[in-house]
Image (cartoon, grey):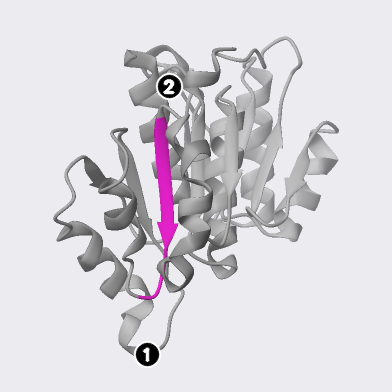
Amino acid sequence: MRKGYEDIGFAKVDHHRMTRKGFPEVIFCQGKTPQQIAKIAQKIWANGHDVLATKADKKAYQAVKKTLKSAKYHESAKIITSQRKTNHKPRTTNHDLQIAIITAGTADLPVAEEAAVTAEFLGHKVERMFDVGVAGIHRLLHNLDRIKKAKVVIVVAGMEGALPSVVGGLIDKPIIAVPTSVGYGANFKGLSALLTMLNSCSPGIAVVNIDNGFGAAVFAHSILKCA
């Protein structure tokens, strides 16, 4: 190993990530073979770090499981985790420092679960509230008191992506908006939701990329570290 990373030919595993960011390198599985994913996971684990792999399928999980017996597959989130009990310490027990993750529809659950599992991996309490979109806004209003208790709110929505703007007009907490590729043709695989969120007139909203639940969770983690 040199300069904080380990060169294994097809990848340079960043073992210094924990020192710089406070959490280990995360494996993005798309485009990698199951064997490559398993090898990277093995190297991360061998250096004393927990493993998180996103956008993973069952073949990737089966390959990792052969190497890391503690590996777990979160099917809805498409995430593989492997954690040591001694490393997994909640960052806070304060109810005010939890993350609320809400979705416009049930179809947005995979992206929301990617955010939720990532946030939990990083040691945060997560409150899930699903299917509270603007098509039945009374569902959102009924859950508003629960949403207000969170320190950071992640809002996941496809179609026209209006939910973050509505939530932003009702609460005073930071909102991380996640557009999803859920929608009919003119949704353009999430582009319409992304543009709606970027053009929101509600203040206090940050927007991550389409289907990027992981990025939303890491951003929420960064906010809470500074709280």
The reply to whether the C-beta atoms of the residues labelled 2 and 1 are less than 8 Å apart is no
Residue topped by disc 1? 185
In percent of width and height, residue 151 lies at 41, 27
Residue neighbourhood size for the residue with mark 2, other residues' Cα within 10 Å, grouped as few (<14), some (14–19), many (≥20): some
Callout 1, which amino acid?
Gly
Callout 2, which amino acid?
Arg
Q: Above or below — where is 62 with respect to 184? A: above
- Which residues are the magenta region? 152-159
Q: Locate residue 107: give its quadrant.
A: bottom right
Indicate whether residue 217 is drawn in magenta: no
For residue 116, which numbered disc appears in the image? none
Q: Above or below — where is 175 with respect to 62? A: above
Residue 30, visible in the rendered structure: no
In percent of width and height, residue 13 lies at 49, 31
Q: Residue at x 64, y 24 (%)?
A: 50
State which tag comes first along the sequence, 2 or 1. Answer: 2
Q: Residue at x 58, y 37 (%)?
A: 127
Determine whether, in the image, residue 38 is placed left or right of residue 129.
right
Residue topped by disc 2? 17
